[in-house]
Image (cartoon, helix red, strand yellow):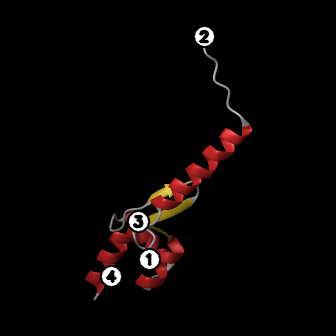
């Protein structure tokens, strides 16, 4: 029977790789634009208040993802709202 041992160095390398992959998920390929935006990053370009953003979530006009206590919005959805606003 073969026993595989995991060293502290293995765990550190795994952590580094995992964090890098998670970071890459937040950016559109070949672009510095984030794929997911926080509430504060959404309110500014849309020129809306916290209450308006909450109402958009409640009525389903703007989808979101909650990770822990932080809400994230898809950049493409924000882009569409900006196009419709003009």
Q: Earlier in the sequence, mark 1 or mark 3?
A: 1
Image position, residue 75 (x, y; %): 39, 70
| Image point (29%, 75%), residue name | 80
Instruction: Find disc 4 in the rendering and name its residue.
Output: 82
Instruction: Find disc 2 in the rendering and name its residue.
Output: 1
Instruction: Find disc 3 in the rendering and name its residue.
Output: 57
The answer to whether the residue labelled 1 contacts the one labelled 2, judged by CB atoms less than 8 Å apart, is: no
The answer to whether the residue labelled 1 contacts the one labelled 3, judged by CB atoms less than 8 Å apart, is: no
Q: Nearer the viewer, residue 58 or 15?
A: 15
Q: Earlier in the sequence, mark 3 or mark 4?
A: 3
Q: Nearer the viewer, residue 84 or 4?
A: 4
Instruction: Find disc 1 in the rendering and name its residue.
Output: 52
How many residues crowd mark 3 within 10 Å: few (<14), some (14–19), many (20+)? Answer: some
Relative to 44, say whether 4 is above or below.
Answer: above
In the image, which is nearer the foreground, mark 2 or mark 4? 2
In the image, which is nearer the foreground, mark 2 or mark 3? 2
């Amino acid at each position: 029977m073969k026993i595989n041992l995991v060293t502290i160095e293995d765990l550190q390398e795994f952590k580094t790789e995992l964090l890098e992959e998670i970071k890459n998920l937040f950016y559109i390929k070949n672009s510095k634009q984030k794929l997911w935006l926080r509430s504060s990053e959404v309110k500014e370009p849309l020129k809306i208040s916290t209450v308006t953003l909450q109402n958009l979530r409640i009525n389903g006009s703007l989808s979101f993802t909650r990770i822990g206590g932080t809400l994230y919005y898809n950049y493409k959805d924000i882009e569409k709202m900006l196009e419709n606003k003009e």
